[in-house]
Image (tube, rainbow, N blue to C red):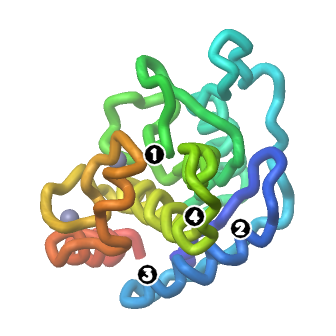
Amino acid sequence: MKISINLQQIGELDRTILRTLKKNLKWALKSFNINLEILEEVIPLTTAEYNPFKRQYDANLIMQNLFKSYKEKGLFRILGILDNDIYVNRYNFIFGSARHPDKIYSPYSPVALISIFRLREEFWGFQADQALFELRILKEALHELGHTFGLIHCENDCIMIFSNSIDDTDNKPPKFCESCKSSIEIFLKNEI
Ligand SMILES: [Zn+2]
Ligand SMILES: [Zn+2]
């Protein structure tokens, strides 16, 4: 199977975000020989995924849709990107998820999802900062993709540190530590 990460737009999203993310991921993953693609079609958001009480979308339901598309197209990895606020189970919000929609306790899923909704400085009451916004998107994408390569959370100076707040995201580097990097290399070798 071709080692390809497919970026999937979900709902309304500025397409330039996908192009920038593709370029940045290419740079961040350059040592792994992974292909990056942007999928043409858009997966729409539906009212079924919307929780009017929380005014947020249910990430598990969106993940189920992504999973369907992953299976139908026979993809290696799919990363959904959306510009709406998402939550899952007991969390008020999440930046992203790579949890298997059916097997909750599975260590990883080939499908991942990130929301860019809370990654803008404006969301937190600060002045817009495009470079910071793009860096945060890259970090969240790398972190969730790390899970799709079997990584669990890490305590080194590493992108796999668990992030519970935007400060956590800002404080970690946009790269894998040496230990996570070699785990990914081993994982990918076994996938081919
Ligand atoms: Zn995580
Ligand atoms: Zn690590």
The residue at which mark 2 appears reads as 17
Residue 68 relative to residue 143: left or right: right
| Contact (Cβ within 8 Å) of mark 4 with mark 1 | no
Against 67, residue 133 (above or below) is below
Query: Dot 3: what SS?
Result: loop
Residue 77 relative to residue 41: left or right: left
- Quadrant where the N terminus is found in the figure: bottom right
Rendered image: mark on residue 133: 4
Residue 56 percent location from the top left of the image: 66, 26
Against 186, residue 109 (above or below) is above
CA gap between label 3 and label 2 equals: 18 Å
Q: Characterize the local packing of mark 2: few (<14), some (14-19) or many (20 or more) Cα atoms within 10 angstroms.
A: some
Rendered image: mark on residue 129: none
The residue at which mark 3 appears reads as 29
Disc 4 marks which amino acid?
Phe
| Contact (Cβ within 8 Å) of mark 3 with mark 4 | no
Q: Is mark 1 within 8 Å of ligand 1?
A: yes
Query: Dot 2: what SS?
Result: helix
Q: Quadrant of residue 170?
A: bottom left
CA gap between label 1 and label 3 equals: 18 Å
Q: Is mark 3 within 8 Å of ligand 2?
A: no
The residue at which mark 1 appears reads as 98
Q: Residue drawn at (18%, 56%), measured in percent from left and top? A: 154
Disc 1 marks which amino acid?
Ala
Mark found first going from the N terminus, 4 or 1: 1
Q: Quadrant of residue 73?
A: bottom right
Q: Residue drawn at (44%, 47%), measured in percent from left and top? A: 109
Nearer-the-camera pick, 137 or 103: 137
Against 66, residue 61 (above or below) is above
Counting every numbered tag in the picture gives 4
Q: Quadrant of residue 78?
A: bottom right
Mark found first going from the N terminus, 1 or 3: 3
